[in-house]
């Protein structure tokens, strides 16, 4: 199954859209739309980054924290350059 073929999430609108099973005799598939509550986990950040709520609804401090940890731990970051560029192209 292709990624995103059953559901998608728009970070811009905060809307989650799901495709439902097609209805026999009708074109396309019905959709269901919702706006899930997404908590910001400030408690996962060091105190120095908790007040930095700028950028993409407060995501930047979390991205910075993950990136720095990946350097310290000598591993690839969870959101690497290829993933970030791919996300950016979709907006």
Image (cartoon, rainbow, N blue to C red):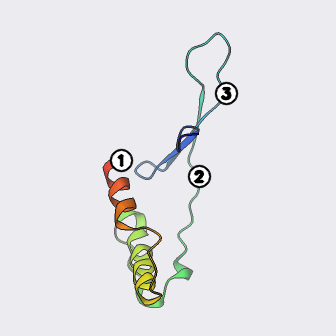
Q: Quadrant of residue 26?
A: top right
Asked whether the residues under the numbered discs 3 and 2 touch, taking CB atoms below 8 Å apart as contact, a structural biologist would say no
Between 87 and 52, the residue placed more toward the observer is 87
Q: Is residue 75 left or right of residue 38?
A: left
Dot 2, crowdedness within 10 Å: few (<14), some or many (≥20)?
A: few
Between 71 and 45, the residue placed more toward the observer is 71
Q: Return the mark for residue 36.
A: 2
- For marks 2 and 1, give the CA distance: 21 Å
Mark positioned earlier in the residue sequence (2 or 1): 2
Between 53 and 19, the residue placed more toward the observer is 19
- For marks 3 and 2, give the CA distance: 21 Å
Residue 25 lies, in percent from the top left, at 65, 9
Q: Which residue is mark 3?
A: 21
Asked if residue 91 shows in the view, the reply is: no
Mark positioned earlier in the residue sequence (3 or 1): 3
| Helix, strand or loop at mark 1 | helix
In this rendering, the answer to whether 43 lies above or below 37 is: below
In this rendering, the answer to whether 40 lies above or below 13 is: below
In this rendering, the answer to whether 13 lies above or below 63 is: above
Mark positioned earlier in the residue sequence (3 or 2): 3
Q: Is residue 25 left or right of residue 73?
A: right
At x 43%, y 90%, the residue is 72
At x 56%, y 48%, the residue is 35
| Helix, strand or loop at mark 3 | loop
* Image quadrant containing the N terminus: top right
Between 59 and 74, the residue placed more toward the observer is 74
Dot 1, crowdedness within 10 Å: few (<14), some or many (≥20)?
A: few
Q: Quadrant of residue 37?
A: bottom right
- For marks 3 and 1, give the CA distance: 25 Å
Asked if residue 45 shows in the view, the reply is: yes
Q: Is residue 62 left or right of residue 34?
A: left
């Amino acid at each position: 199954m292709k990624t995103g073929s059953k559901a998608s999430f728009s970070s811009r609108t905060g809307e989650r859209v799901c495709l439902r099973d097609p209805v026999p005799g009708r074109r396309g598939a019905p959709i269901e739309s919702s706006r899930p509550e997404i908590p910001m986990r400030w408690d996962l950040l060091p105190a120095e980054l908790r007040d930095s709520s700028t950028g993409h609804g407060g995501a930047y401090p979390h991205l910075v924290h993950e990136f720095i940890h990946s350097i310290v731990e000598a591993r690839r970051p969870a959101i690497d350059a290829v993933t970030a560029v791919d996300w950016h192209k979709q907006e």
